[in-house]
Image: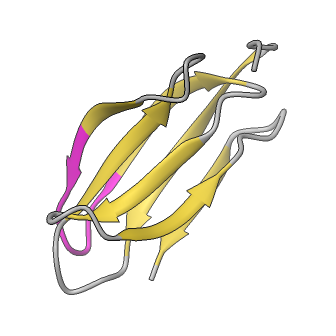
């Protein structure tokens, strides 16, 4: 998993509970990048080829995202 060009993801939480955002590092380990409250969004700088995982606060997996060349919104429902 090597990084490509710089880009960004906007994580938008449409759930009724807080979600947790993780980057999956080059060793496959989850690196916590913080929480997004219900109804909130957060822009996260990243690179092509860097996977992201969103979970509930207790760690239940919800969705995975891979960045695109253009800034994109990752909607969590």
Question: Residue at 71% across / 40% down in the picture?
Answer: 67
Q: For residue 29, which quarter of the picture?
A: top left
Question: Residue at 52% across / 69% down in the picture?
Answer: 75
Viewer-proximal residue, 47 or 25? 25
Q: Which image quarter holds the C terminus?
A: bottom left
Task: Answer whether residue 22 is magenta in the image.
Answer: no
Question: Residue at 77% across / 26% down in the picture?
Answer: 48
Percent from the top left, x then y, of residue 32?
28, 34
Q: Which image quarter holds the N terminus?
A: top right
Image height check: is 56 above or below 27? below
Magenta range is: 34-41
Image position of 18 (left or right of 77): left
Q: For residue 17, which quarter of the picture?
A: bottom left
Q: How many marks?
A: 0
Percent from the top left, x then y, of residue 37?
17, 63
Image height check: is 5 above or below 21? above
Q: For residue 74, which quarter of the picture?
A: bottom right
Image position of 52 (left or right of 18): right
Percent from the top left, x then y, of residue 28?
54, 29
Question: Residue at 74% across / 13% down in the picture?
Answer: 3
Task: Answer whether residue 37 is magenta in the image.
Answer: yes
């Amino acid at each position: 998993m090597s990084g490509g060009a710089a880009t960004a993801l906007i994580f938008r939480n449409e759930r009724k509970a807080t979600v947790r955002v993780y980057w999956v590092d080059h060793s496959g380990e989850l690196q916590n990048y913080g929480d997004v409250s219900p109804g909130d969004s957060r822009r996260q700088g990243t690179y092509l080829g860097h996977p992201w995982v969103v979970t509930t606060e207790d760690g239940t997996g919800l969705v995975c995202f891979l960045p695109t060349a253009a800034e994109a919104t990752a909607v969590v429902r």
